[in-house]
């Protein structure tokens, strides 16, 4: 598969602080690549290096198989990006902002194209409104619009749902999936919210303190993790005594009034349920917690 | 480059702060002219009092040319602030607004972007000087009429009416070059920080300090004077000498141009390596 982004030994130091430390990552054509890490992990610094806002201290970045340093303009012609929160010229309209950014990029800035983009992000009715009157969500959508303006092959999105309401988040997720599936774009999606990435990404990397913690397909990482499963039961004391001295005892995380939290492999849920039911325990519900969320916290907490 | 400059000029002229300079000149100069209209005779008598015993002054000496000359002399001290107001904002304003991120992720080189911004700043600067010329000379001639220009330096020099306009054109061009140095300096400071207030204040501080150094007549300051660009900012006054020392004027203009190139070169060098963190 063709690599769209290839990062090797990428390091960025700000005086004494090492924000990104020997980072390696690969993004392939067609990927929705989740770039995860807690706040301060080095995600934005990495994205700023990918978009040439800051210069790496060492390491190499190749995009579309070419060195970013030596082919900056050629590469950026095929890259659209939102870096952190999108800011625009507040004293200009949404339309004018896109027109200016399009002209700088040397792309089609016809009325048809700009209105098409504004329609894509749901801002066509506010085309002539000054951006300073926009809500944060509208600015985010306009940010996505400017990233799509020149029809890029690679779209880099840095926390694109920050500050959006649930409906706004859903719309952005749907747009990301649409861009990937229908328009064959490669998406590099940074976030500190794992569930957001889990819903759309096919591959992901988790970084902490500027270093890779884990990288792989979302599916593999999901399967590789333990589940936190809550069993809701009718008799807690009887269950406790039944479980004592069994293999399940060491899998117990905690007890509630009518709940027991287990840390289990996926395949262990059914046998445990059978074990309880056969011994007359009423199991009212079995609720698995989002495994990757736990995994994420576990990995990043380990690093702190 | 043409498109980039056009975009930058559009952005400059969509900001209200751009018009502060034009409004300030548009208000201040007519106020001076009105004051001179009513009390100019006293002023003229004051400046010619030491020559009254030996000379007889006849004709319309309080004319549009004299008023424009006086205004040019007084405003070249204050116009730098109006220029710094815009040039200090050219790069730092993008940082404050967070729009650097949008601009620098576009497929244009930083060099082109900075050059376009600088050219726009120079255009603004020159338009401001042109506006000063139109208001002070144009309006002055309308209100006061024309006549001979009396200039008092070490000696008294009177220029014939037909020998004046080209001198003003030359003087405004020299003043424009001086103000372009201010623009370049403000632009340099603008590239270093993330807030426009800093470059504006710093530019003015440098100009004030250098001007004070230039004015103090002791050996130490006389030694450093040739290295202070403010020393060359009143080159326009040399155009109103008789005879004109062209060698001195050319040397001064080259020094000013050198400063513009130097300040811009440093800006380019620093900005190409700058990490955009806003």
Image: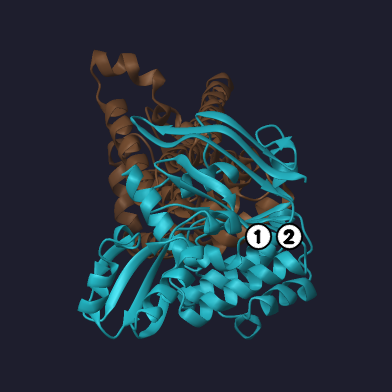
The residue at 56%/63% (across/down) is: B13
Which residue appears at 28% of the width and 46% of the height?
B46
Q: Chain of mark 2?
A: A
| Image-based side of A296 in relation to B255, left or right | left
**Is A131 on the left or on the right of B200, as rendered?**
right
Residue B38 rendering spot, x and y as whole percentages: 34, 65
Answer left or right for B244 relative to A273: right
- Residue B106 circle label: none
The residue under the point 46% across, 75% down is: A164
Q: State the separation of the CA atoms marked 1 and 2.
A: 20 Å
Colour convention: by chain
Please say if B40 is above or below B159.
below
Q: Position of residue A250 (x, y in %)?
A: 30, 57
Chain at tag 1 = A
The percent position of residue B66, horizontal first and vertical second, equals: 45, 49
Where is mark 1, residue-wise?
A101
Nearest to the observer: residue A38 or residue A246: A246
The spot of residue A83 in percent (x, y) is 53, 55
Q: Earlier in the sequence, mark 1 or mark 2?
A: 1
Query: Crowding at label 2, few (<14), some or many (≥20) Cα neighbours within 10 Å?
Result: many
Does the image show residue B63?
no
Q: Between B104 and A16, which is closer to the camera in this rendering?
A: A16
Residue indicated by mark 2: A185
What element does badge 1 sit on? helix
Asked if residue A215 lies left or right of residue B34, the reply is: right
Q: Depth-wise, is mark 1 or mark 2 nearer the camera?
A: 2
Chain in brown on the image: B
Secondary structure beneath label 2: loop
Q: Is residue A206 visible?
A: yes
| Shade representing chain A | cyan
Q: Compare residues A213 and A176 and report the one nearer the observer.
A: A213
User: Does B72 sit above or below residue A131?
Assistant: above
């Amino acid at each position: 598969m063709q690599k769209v982004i290839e990062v090797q030994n990428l390091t960025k130091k700000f005086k004494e602080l090492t924000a990104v430390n020997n980072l390696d990552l690969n993004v392939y054509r067609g990927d929705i690549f989740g770039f995860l890490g807690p706040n301060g992990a080095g995600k934005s610094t990495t994205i700023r290096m990918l978009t040439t806002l800051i210069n790496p201290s060492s390491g190499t970045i190749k995009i579309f198989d070419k060195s970013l340093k030596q082919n900056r303009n050629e590469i950026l012609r095929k890259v659209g990006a939102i870096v952190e929160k999108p800011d625009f010229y507040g004293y200009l309209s949404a339309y004018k902002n896109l027109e200016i950014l399009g002209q700088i990029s040397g792309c089609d800035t016809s009325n048809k194209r700009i209105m098409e983009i504004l329609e894509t992000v749901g801002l066509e009715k506010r085309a002539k409104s000054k951006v300073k009157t926009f809500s944060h969500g509208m600015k985010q959508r306009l940010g996505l619009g400017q990233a799509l303006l020149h029809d890029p092959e690679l779209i880099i999105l840095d926390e694109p749902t920050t500050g959006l309401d649930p409906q706004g988040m859903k719309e952005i997720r749907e747009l990301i999936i649409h861009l990937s599936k229908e328009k064959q774009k490669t998406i590099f999606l940074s976030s500190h919210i794992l569930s957001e990435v889990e819903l759309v990404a096919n591959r992901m990397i988790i970084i902490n303190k500027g270093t890779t913690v884990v990288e792989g397909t979302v599916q593999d990482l999901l399967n590789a993790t333990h589940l936190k499963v809550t069993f809701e039961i009718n008799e807690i004391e009887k269950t406790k005594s039944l479980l004592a001295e069994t293999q399940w005892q060491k899998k117990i995380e905690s007890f509630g009034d009518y709940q027991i939290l287990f840390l289990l492999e996926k395949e262990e849920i059914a046998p445990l349920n059978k074990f309880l039911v056969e011994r007359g325990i009423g199991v009212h519900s079995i609720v698995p917690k989002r495994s990757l969320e736990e995994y994420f916290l576990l990995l990043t907490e380990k690093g702190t | 480059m043409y498109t980039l400059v056009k975009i930058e000029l559009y952005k400059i002229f969509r900001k209200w702060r751009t018009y502060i300079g034009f409004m300030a000149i548009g208000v201040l100069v007519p106020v001076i002219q009105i004051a001179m209209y009513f009390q100019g005779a006293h002023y003229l008598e004051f400046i010619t009092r030491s020559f009254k015993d030996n000379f007889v002054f006849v004709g319309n000496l309080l004319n549009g040319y004299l008023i424009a000359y006086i205004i040019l002399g007084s405003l070249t001290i204050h116009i730098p602030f109006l220029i710094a107001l815009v040039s200090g904002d050219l790069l730092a304003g993008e940082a404050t607004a967070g729009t650097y991120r949008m601009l620098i992720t576009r497929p244009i080189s930083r060099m082109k972007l900075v050059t376009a911004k600088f050219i726009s700043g120079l255009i603004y600067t020159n338009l401001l000087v042109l506006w000063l010329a139109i208001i002070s000379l144009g309006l002055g001639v309308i209100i006061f009429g024309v006549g001979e220009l009396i200039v008092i330096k070490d000696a008294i020099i009177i220029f014939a009416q037909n020998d004046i306009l080209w001198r003003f054109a030359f003087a405004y061009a020299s003043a424009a070059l001086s103000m372009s140095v201010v623009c370049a300096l403000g632009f340099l400071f603008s590239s270093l920080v993330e807030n426009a207030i800093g470059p504006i204040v710093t530019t003015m501080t440098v100009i004030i300090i250098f001007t004070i150094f230039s004015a103090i007549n002791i050996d130490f300051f006389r030694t450093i004077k040739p290295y202070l660009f403010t020393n060359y900012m009143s080159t326009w006054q040399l155009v109103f000498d008789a005879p004109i020392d062209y060698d001195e004027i050319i040397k001064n203009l080259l020094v000013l141009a050198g400063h513009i190139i130097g300040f811009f070169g440093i800006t380019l060098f620093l900005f190409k390596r700058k990490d955009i963190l806003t």
